[in-house]
């Protein structure tokens, strides 16, 4: 039983030592990162501001392009609607034309029959 307890204590102490080492490494890395960030923050701020300005300019251009595209889309949608209306009217005219042709053929047949009856 004592050997099991000793083994458990030894593994626990090993884990504690490993955790302490990892904690120290993480703390050192964080300190180094903070020092580097503090030292480099002033010099690296200029490119960030430059990028921000460029992104804002591109964003404005993108908004203008979106507005223009929206206007073009509305124009195309209106044109397509007008084209559909025109095609519907042409279809109606075709039906009227076919009806008139049929009626003229009926009149022609009736006149021919009358002429044949008189002869």
Image (spheres, rainbow, N blue to C red):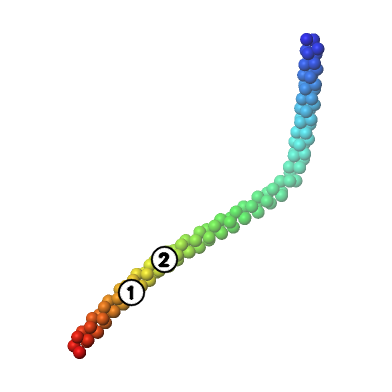
Could you say which quadrant of the image residue 89 lies in?
A: bottom left
Q: Give the number of the disc on residue 88.
A: none
Judged left or right of residue 64, residue 9 is right
Q: What is the x, y in percent for residue 71?
A: 49, 61
Residue 74 vertical placement versus 91 (above, below): above
Count residues near mark 2 (Cα–Cα under 10 Å), then give few for <14, some for 14-19, many for 20+: few
Q: Nearer the viewer, residue 96 or 113?
A: 113
Residue 107 vertical placement versus 54 (above, below): below
Image quadrant in which the N terminus is located:
top right
Query: Residue sitting at 76 percent across and 36 percent down?
Result: 33
Q: Nearer the viewer, residue 83 or 57?
A: 83
Q: What is the x, y in percent for residue 38?
A: 75, 39
Give the spatial CA distance, label 1 vs label 2.
Answer: 21 Å
Q: What is the x, y in percent for residue 13?
A: 79, 19
Whichever of labels 1 and 2 marks the residue nearer the N terminus, that label is 2
Residue that carries the numbered disc 1 in the rendered image:
98
Dot 1: element: helix
Image quadrant in which the C terminus is located:
bottom left
The answer to whether any part of residue 82 appears in the image is no
Judged left or right of residue 62, residue 11 is right
Q: What is the x, y in percent for residue 66?
A: 54, 57
Query: Residue sitting at 74 percent across and 44 percent down?
Result: 42
Which dot, 1 or 2, sits closer to the camera? 1
Judged left or right of residue 102, residue 15 is right
Query: Residue sitting at 50 percent across and 63 percent down?
Result: 72
Dot 2: element: helix
Residue that carries the numbered disc 2 in the rendered image:
84
Count residues near mark 1 (Cα–Cα under 10 Å), then give few for <14, some for 14-19, many for 20+: few
Query: Residue sitting at 24 percent across and 84 percent down?
Result: 112
The answer to whether any part of residue 94 appears in the image is yes
Q: Nearer the viewer, residue 77 or 44?
A: 77
């Amino acid at each position: 039983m004592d050997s099991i307890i000793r083994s458990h204590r030894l593994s626990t102490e090993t884990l504690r030592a490993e955790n302490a080492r990892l904690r120290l490494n993480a703390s050192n890395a964080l300190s180094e990162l903070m020092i580097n960030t503090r030292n480099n923050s002033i010099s690296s701020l200029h490119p960030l501001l430059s990028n921000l300005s460029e992104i804002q300019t591109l964003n404005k251009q993108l908004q203008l392009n979106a507005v223009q595209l929206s206007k073009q889309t509305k124009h195309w949608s209106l044109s397509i609607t007008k084209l559909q209306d025109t095609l519907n009217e042409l279809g109606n005219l075709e039906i009227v034309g076919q009806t008139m042709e049929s009626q003229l053929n009926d009149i022609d047949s009736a006149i021919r029959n009358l002429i044949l009856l008189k002869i």
